[in-house]
């Protein structure tokens, strides 16, 4: 998995969902319902889209957050990271990161990500800079 520096930040309603149920739940909802207006209901059934997308416990937490157990809430889910371009870019980053982690050369990184060697060197610099620094010895 890539460091958080390479993750696109969530905004608006997705960040609110991530705060309640986790980033994975927010991205799962975005993948299933991105670009749509949905209702989050107070009484969930196993057939509800939210339960199917994130599971019962996370759906219950999201439902309680938005409805307080009394009514339904209309919400618009942004399209965001589910597009083909973002998926392809994420796949490339992961492939290049894997080569860097095993100590591959810039040409190997470029081949894995299907980019130029210059782009691979730039990516390697940013990737390595985003990793936590090792503690220095006294």
Image (cartoon, rainbow, N blue to C red):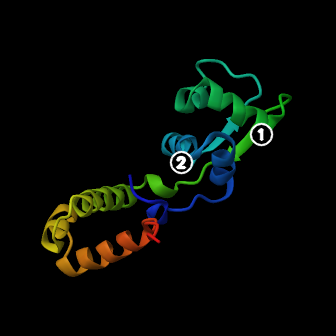
- Compute the Cα span from label 1 to label 2: 18 Å
Residue, x 13% and y 72% (percent of image)? 107
Side (left or right) of 15 relative to 7:
right
Q: Residue at x 63, y 32 (%)?
A: 58
Disc 1 or 2, which lies upstream in sequence? 2
Instruction: Name the side, left or right, on which 4 lies relative to 71.
Output: left
Q: Look at discs 1 and 2 and give the one toward the viewer.
A: 1
Q: Viewer-proximal residue, 87 or 76?
A: 87
* Position in image of residue 39 (x %, y %): 69, 36
Element assignment for label 1? helix
Position in image of residue 91 (x %, y %): 30, 55
Q: Quadrant of residue 119?
A: bottom left
In the rendered image of this protein, does residue 62 appear above or below residue 80? above
Q: Which mark is residue 34?
A: 2
Taking the spot 69% from the left edge, 50% from the top edge, the residue there is 16
* Residue 17 rendering spot, x and y as whole percentages: 66, 45
Tag on residue 93?
Answer: none
Q: Residue at x 38, y 75 (%)?
A: 126
Mark 1 Cα-neighbour bin, 10 Å: few <14, some 14–19, many ≥20: many
Q: Residues within 10 Å of mark 2 (few under 14, many from 20)?
A: some
Residue 82 visible in the current orientation = yes
Residue 41: name its quadrant: top right
**95 above or below 71?**
below
Q: Compare residues 126 and 25 and report the one nearer the observer.
A: 126
Judging depth in this view, the residue of 125 and 136 nearest the camera is: 136
> Is 70 left, or right, of 81 in this rendering?
right
Disc 1: which residue = 66
Q: Is residue 39 above or below residue 129?
A: above
């Amino acid at each position: 998995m890539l460091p958080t520096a390479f993750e696109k930040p969530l905004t608006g309603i997705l960040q609110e969902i991530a705060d309640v149920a986790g980033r994975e739940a927010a991205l799962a909802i975005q993948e299933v319902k991105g670009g749509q207006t949905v209702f989050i209901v107070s009484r969930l059934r196993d057939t509800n889209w939210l339960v199917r997308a994130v599971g019962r416990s996370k759906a219950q937490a999201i439902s309680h957050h938005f409805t307080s157990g009394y009514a339904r809430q209309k919400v618009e889910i942004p399209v965001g990271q589910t597009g083909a371009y973002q998926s392809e870019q994420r796949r490339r980053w992961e492939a290049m990161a894997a080569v860097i982690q095993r100590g591959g050369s810039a040409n190997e990184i470029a081949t894995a990500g299907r980019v130029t060697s210059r782009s691979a060197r730039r990516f390697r610099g940013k990737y390595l800079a985003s990793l936590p620094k090792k503690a220095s010895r006294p």
